[in-house]
Structure formats: C-alpha cells, structure tokens
Amino acid sequence: MTASQHDMKPILILGGTGKTGRRIAEQLAQCNLPVRIGSRGATPSFDWDDRASWAGAVEGAGAVYISYYPDLAAPGAAEAVGAFAEFAVGMGVKRLVLLSGRGEPEAQRAEERVEQSGADWTILRCSWFMQNFSESFLLDAVLSGEVALPVGAVGEPFVDTDDIADAAVAALSDDRHIGQLYELTGPRLLTFADAVAEISAAAGREIRFVELSVADFKAGLVEQQLSQELVDLLMMLFTEVLDGRNQQVVDGVSRALGRPARDFTRYARTVAATGIWGDKA
C-alpha cells in the first residue's frame, strides 16, 4: 500500500452490496483498510436520487469507489456522477475510482466528468460481467433452462467481477494507478450462445440459448411489469451496446494487475460447483 493508506481515512464503496462493491469491501477489510458502505440500507445511508444523503456518506472519506445505479448507460447518469465527483472533492476526498462500461456514450461522459473533478482518478471500463449469469438478472433464465435474448453471433469478452474487484482495490490503495484508464475484459470472445453452452456443460444439465426478436424481447419485459426506465435501459444495452462495437479483447487486466484475466470456463466451473445453477440431471 502507498499514500500512507490514505491516512487511514475510510474508503467509501458506493454500491457496496452489489456484485463488484461487495468483493471490493471484503478485500479492503482483509487489508485492514477502513471501509464504509454506500447504499440505501447503510448507516449513514446513500441514495443517488437524494443528494441530501451524500454528505453523511462522504464525510471524512479519503477515497470513493463509484458504482452508479442502475447503470452508467442510463440517461442522466453522467450528470449525477459529475455532480457527486465535484461534491466529494469539495468534501476533501482525494481519490475516485469509477466503474464504467465499454461502448456506452453516457458512461464515457461520466468518465470525463470524473477526470475533470480535480481528484486523483482511475477509470475501470468494463465489458459484460460473467456474474450476470449467476448473481443478476440472467440467473432465473439459467435456472429455467432457457436463456432468451435479442443477441445473435456477437462476440463479447465477458469479464470476471473478481478481476474488476482486484483492479479496484489496487487503484484505491496504490498511487501507481492514478490517472489510468483500464479497459477490463476477459481473455477471449464468446457469443451469448457460447457462454450458455459453457454454463450448461459445467452445470451438467441442459440449458439452451434462444435468439429472440427485439420486439419479442421488449414485449417480455413489459409483461414482467418492469419500470419504463428499466425497459428502456435493457433495450439499449441489448440492441445498441451489443451491436459488435465491443468485439475486442484488450489488456487492461494484465496492465492493472500484472497477470492474465480469468477465463469464462474457470468461472462456469467454479459457480457450478456451488450448486447455484441447480442439481445435475
């Protein structure tokens, strides 16, 4: 660790109970670094939509990991993140680490706002999470035996959230990462059909991938009575971000951590061993 471990000021983890935040908080605690969780259920609470809650969460913190809810691709995200970054710097925060997304114009506007905040910054620009199949909205589909999405033969370099967490902990605790933009991907491209096939093999049960039309996908979201905001976000992510713009593997994990990125096969076998994807047939 460097920078006197930020003089032992707390490190605020926004989204500290989420897929990346939980892992980051656990690692920092293991390093005996003081951690503060930023979420609606924390004390003090943090709510992106309630700026009056920001001061209590930020006060006294030396660094912040910024994970925006529901997603940096959502309209207005850049403005919210920019306002928070300026507020945090005004409260004495020295370091900001932003979780960003590849191929998302709104996310890249948020990156610019963080870079302009005056803080020591690091950007983690990430591909699709492997853990979306096991800790997020695709888990129910995997358990049902059919993952149906409006995605064709587009390759995606799925990234393991453990790699994201490792990079975030490094950026929060080591000055060498200041001013760096790390584009984090897995080591190879897989289509969603490839990914589902690997999960099926690891789980030892039949799980099919079905390519939906965009219209059918949207109709299914509406049928689930999701909010219009969430429907619009998911439509954008699946029909725009997955248009082939991100079909490249890059070296951000090795640049940040000095080791290769974790592979999807390892992820699938590790998760399957927990039994979360159901018993083998």
Image: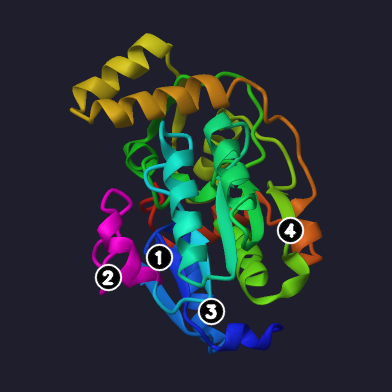
- Amino acid found under the numbered disc labelled 1: Gly
Identify the element where label 1 is drawn: loop
Disc 1: which residue: 16
- Amino acid found under the numbered disc labelled 3: Leu
Farthest residue in the front direction?
Answer: 90
Return the mark for residue 76: none
Q: Where 134 sits versus 237, above or below?
A: below
Cα–Cα gap, marks 1 and 2 = 9 Å
Which comes before the other along the chain, label 3 or label 4?
A: 3
- Amino acid found under the numbered disc labelled 2: Ala
| Residue at 53% over, 85% down | 33
**Magenta residues: mostly which secondary structure?**
loop
Q: Are marks 1 and 2 in contact (CB under 8 Å)?
A: yes
Rendered location of residue 278, percent (x, y): 36, 51
Cα–Cα gap, marks 3 and 4 = 21 Å
Rendered location of residue 214, percent (x, y): 42, 13
Rendered location of residue 247, percent (x, y): 71, 29
Which comes before the other along the chain, label 3 or label 1?
A: 1
| Number of other residues with Cα within 10 Å of mark 1, as a class: few under 14, some 14 to 19, many 20 or more | many
Cα–Cα gap, marks 3 and 2 = 17 Å
Q: Are marks 3 and 2 in contact (CB under 8 Å)?
A: no
Color encoding of the figure: rainbow
Return the mark for residue 42: 2
Disc 4: which residue: 179
Which comes before the other along the chain, label 1 or label 2?
A: 1
Disc 3: which residue: 28
Residue 50 painted magenta = yes
Which segment did they paint magenta?
39-58
